[in-house]
Structures are given as structure tokens and as C-alpha cells.
Image (spheres, helix red, strand yellow):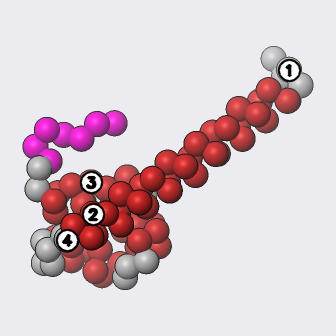
Amino acid sequence: MTLPLTMQDPQDHFAYCVQMLGGTTAASRRLGIDERAIRRFVSGERPVSTRLLEDTSQALGALIADAQAAQQRIAETIRMAPDQG
């Protein structure tokens, strides 16, 4: 999935990243920020800082690493499984 071309505002981009992290609750856990604060950033009630975007970038990187490890484990399991077909 790619970012829509209209997503230039940090608030909109942060909201998009929150969805990529799995929603408000998952983003809250990964970022160590209260869910209410996440919603305030997304709604524009609070400004999205450069630091918040940096932390979000790191959280997305960790999610990518977790997903790649899970994908690798699935691939290994499939290779080692007897043919079921």
C-alpha cells in the first residue's frame, strides 16, 4: 500500500501511520502513549511534533521487523512440512 498523494500534512500522515500500526490501541502500545493522546494528535487537537514522527517511524520499523520475522517463520514451517497436497 502506498501513501495517497494528498497526505502532506503531518497530522494526516500520523493518522495514516496509526492505521498502519494497527489502530489507536496498537499504536498506543507501540508508542507508549495514552490512547486519548493518540486521538488528540489524529484529530488535530494537539500538534504532531517531529519527535512524535520520529518515534512513529521507529515503531513502524519495529513492526516491519516483527512482520518479516513472522513471514520467515511461516516460510520455514512450510518448507519443513510434509506435502499435504
Magenta-drawn segment: 1-7
CA–CA distance in space, label 1 to label 3? 40 Å
Residue at 13% across, 78% down: 45
Camera-nearest label, 1 or 2? 2
Residue of label 2: 53
Which kind of residue does numbered mark 1 sit on? Answer: Asp
User: Is there a contact, CB below 8 Å, between mark 1 and mark 3?
Assistant: no
For residue 15, above or below residue 3: below
The question of residue 78 being in magenta is answered with no
For residue 43, above or below residue 75: below
In this rendering, position of residue 63 left or right of residue 8: right
User: Is there a contact, CB below 8 Å, between mark 2 and mark 3?
Assistant: no
Residue 10 in percent (x, y) is at: 16, 59
Residue of label 1: 83
Residue at 58% across, 52% down: 66
Does residue 73 appear in the picture of this structure? Answer: yes
